[in-house]
Amino acid sequence: MRPPILAAWLGRAEVAPPPDIASAALRSDRFRLAREGEWRRLEEIVTRMERGQLRRIADADLIALPALYRTAASSLAVARETSLDAATLAYLEALVQRAWFQVYGPRQGLVRWLRGFLFGGWSRTVRAVGLDMAIALGVMLAGVLVGWLLVAGDEAWYFRLVPSGLADTRVPGASREALLATLGTEKSAGGLSAFAAQLFSNNSAVCILAFALGFAFGIPSLMLLVHNMAMLGALVWLFAGEGLGLELVAWLSVHGTTELFGILLSGAAGLHIGRAMAFPGELGVLEAASAAGRRSALVMVGVVLMMIIAALLEAFARQLVGGTTERLAIGGTMLAFWLSYFFLYRPPARGEGGA
């Protein structure tokens, strides 16, 4: 292909082109002809990769891809320095940019990553921190027991464990009717969307804190779990004392099976990082912490989704559904869903969205 500048001059036979312009056009032609074969090969490989036809590319072409990209990038640098024709320069700039995304760019888009994350990647990552989940679950159950025993031994502990905003009329000495009224429903959904946003913010803050404290060998994360679950133990003691234990469990289960599961995963994620730092094994401390951090970060991405669901359940389903049986059904369904998703749903790994 003859460059446009030279073609224009040759089209005017009666006027000879200036020697410097003709020389530049000739250099551009020689430069392009010497390298055009490699450019075309790179362009064909990149085009097939952009179309998702990776299997149709020969192994030799895939192996040569990095070298072809570097050659094209070098040609682009030369073209810029020597002021070659605009057409060649534009072609190389576009080709190098496209090739860069295939060689160094992200391997998959957001939609594809999210699909891989939800359909197998998240559940595999959660199972990878199974030991940390077991430890965190034991700590959470111990926290409930500690809260119960502390309040049973001294009611003053109730006011230390339960925030005043949550306590309200839920205090030792309250009548059965007063406690039962706190488990009631709203007559309409008006204003509950703002309530859902507030709950999501609070729940997410607890989860992020439990995760972030893991750097200190996981100990602060476990302490936070104990403190939060001790509050639950105090509430269970209060309501069970008035024969409302089942009603409280039903009231909490609507959102609690999702929210507490998310808190459990957050604590496990933090503990996973702390345990990797304390026991790095054959890896260095920084390498072990880095690998654990990447795995825990994936867990936390899913926890954010769980907190959104928990906030919606707490603000709407719990406030609008009043029957104990119905509430237990909702909570039980959500618990069965999470357990099935994390431990029974095991699609083949495809290397997308997982650890």
Image: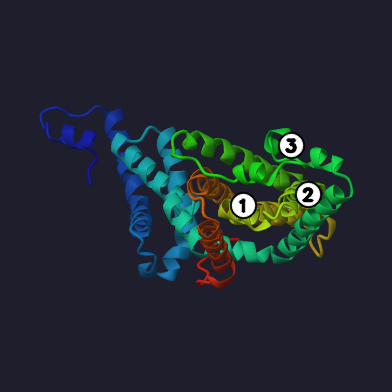
> From where the camera sits, is residue 287 visible?
no
Task: Give the number of marks.
Answer: 3
Q: Marks 3 and 1, how far apart in space?
A: 17 Å
Quarter holding the C terminus is bottom right
Q: Marks 1 and 2, how far apart in space?
A: 15 Å
Query: What residue do we see at 62% from left, 52% from top?
Result: 252
Badge 2 amino acid: Ala
Return the x and y of residue 257 as percentages of the image width and height.
60, 57
Query: What residue do we see at 31% from left, 29% from top?
Result: 20
Return the x and y of residue 284 as percentages of the image width and height.
80, 57
Identify the disc placed on residue 163. Answer: 3
140 vs 7: above or below = below
Asked which secondary structure carries label 3, the reply is loop
Query: What residue do we see at 56% from left, 72% from top?
Result: 344
Q: Quadrant of residue 48?
A: bottom left
Asked which secondary structure carries label 2, the reply is helix
Q: Nearer the viewer, residue 8 or 148?
A: 148
Asked which secondary structure carries label 1, the reply is helix
Return the x and y of residue 78 as percentages of the image width and height.
44, 39
Q: Quadrant of residue 124?
A: bottom right
N-term-proximal mark, 1 vs 2: 2
Image position of 173 (left or right of 14): right
241 vs 316: above or below = below
Q: Nearer the viewer, residue 154 or 55?
A: 154
Question: How busy is the neighbourhood of tag 1: few (under 14 within 10 Å), some, or many (20 plus)?
Answer: many
Badge 3 amino acid: Pro
Identify the disc placed on residue 252. Answer: 1
